[in-house]
Image: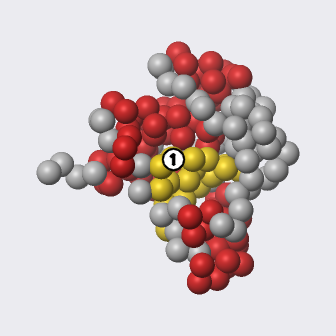
Amino acid sequence: MKILFVCLGNICRSPAAEGVFLHQLVERELNEHFVVDSAGTGGWHVGNPADRRMQAAANRRGIQLPSCARQISLDDLSEFDLILTMDDANLAAVTSLASEAGRRATAKIKPILSYTSQFSETEVPDPYYGGEEGFEHVLDLLENACSNLLDDLSPPA
Ligand code: 4NP
């Protein structure tokens, strides 16, 4: 199964989601069954690694962020099975790209926080202009949502 996480810049939230999900896949020995990537709806940071504050917060939890920023393309709508967006603006941008791609757009598109069970928020807040606690909160949201996502995708035999 191929999963793409999407945010605006592809340097904070979606690289964190990618790293958290990859970490949980390894923990559950499921990594051979998934292809995981992340992308941004904007192109300002193309080629950049994840924001160093996001990397530091993830590393404190034993999570690595392997991402190199790229912008989402029309091909992603047919290449991936599931596209998970971080906020309403990302969802609108990816949905609009899907209408542009027409019948080629086979990916399911969903907000990542549709999978959260512990938080009432519907959007992962952009931590870029805030303090350290914003990056921790992003990881709290993503760890809960990714764990439930994985439960959903791999029900116990
Ligand atoms: P992200 O955060 O969407 O979580 O990667 C952002 C980081 C930088 C910018 C926008 C969003 N920016 O415009 O520079």
- The quarter holding residue 152 reads bottom left
Furthest toward the right, the residue is: 44
| Residue at the farthest bottom position | 103
Q: Is residue 118 above or below residue 52?
A: below
Question: In the image, is 120 to the left or to the right of 8?
Answer: left
Residue 151 in view? yes
Residue 133 visible in the shown view:
no
Which residue is identified by label 1? 36
Residue 101 pos. (x, y %)? 67, 77
Type of amino acid under label 1: Val
User: x, y (%) of residue 29?
Assistant: 30, 36
- Residue at image coords 42%, 49%: 34
Residue at far left of view:
157
Crowding at dot 1, Cα within 10 Å, few <14 / some 14-19 / many 20+, comes out as some
Q: Residue at x 70, y 73 (%)?
A: 96
Q: Residue at x 23, y 52 (%)?
A: 155
Task: Tell me where residue 15 appears, x and y as whole percent.
Answer: 61, 38
Pick whichever, 63 or 138, lies toward us.
Answer: 63
Residue 98 at what x, y percent from top left?
Answer: 64, 73
Direction from residue 67 to residue 128 in the image, left or right:
right
Dot 1: element: strand
Q: Residue furthest front?
A: 32
Q: Nearer the viewer, residue 125 or 28?
A: 28
| Quadrant housing the N terminus | bottom left
Please say if 109 is above or below 150. Answer: below
